[in-house]
Amino acid sequence: MVKIINTSGKRKTAIARATLKAGKGVIRVNSVPLEAFGSETTRMKIAEPILLVPNAIHGIDVVIDVAGGGVMGQAEAVRTALARGIVKWHNDPQMKDIFLAYDRTLLVNDSRQKETKKPHGRGARKKFQKSYR
């Protein structure tokens, strides 16, 4: 039986879906290896779960598809999906505690969303100026 694990992560409007299976330890985001994905900042953000538990992805291939949102929203969705997948693969409560102690959003989706625009203004709270004469 082949072990395959599917996880997901969300941040704002970005959704990342990760698939983990036995392999050589390669991480691909939207079919691009992690080493070549995005900017240095986004790569560092995505690699946080791997840095916290260094040999967690040895022998695991990770394929992550991410859509929606902006650059950093996608990066944070990817890191959540990756961390969840690693914890689910190893089934180790100690690893889960390490991730939660470092940053809760590694395992829990950040539910904050942009507040919707309201009438009579430019945004959610800002109102157009009014003049009496």
Image: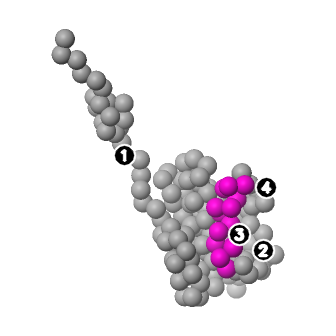
In the picture of the structure, the residue carrying the numbered disc 4 is 36
| Mark 4 / mark 2, whichever is N-terminal | 2
Q: Amino acid at mark 2?
A: Gly
Label 3 or label 4, whichever lies nearer to me, is 4
Quick one: SS at disc 3?
Answer: strand
- Which residue appears at 54% of the width and 48% of the height? 69
Quarter of the N terminus within the rendering: bottom right
In the picture of the structure, the residue carrying the numbered disc 3 is 62
User: Extreme right residue here?
Assistant: 24
| Mark 2 / mark 3, whichever is N-terminal | 2
Return the residue nearer the eye: 9 or 48: 48
| Mark 1 / mark 4, whichever is N-terminal | 4
For the residue carrying disc 1, how many other residues have a C-alpha within 10 Å: few (<14), some (14-19), or many (20+)? few
Rendered location of residue 108, percent (x, y): 48, 69
Rendered location of residue 54, percent (x, y): 72, 79
- Which residue appears at 65% of the width and 68% of the height? 48
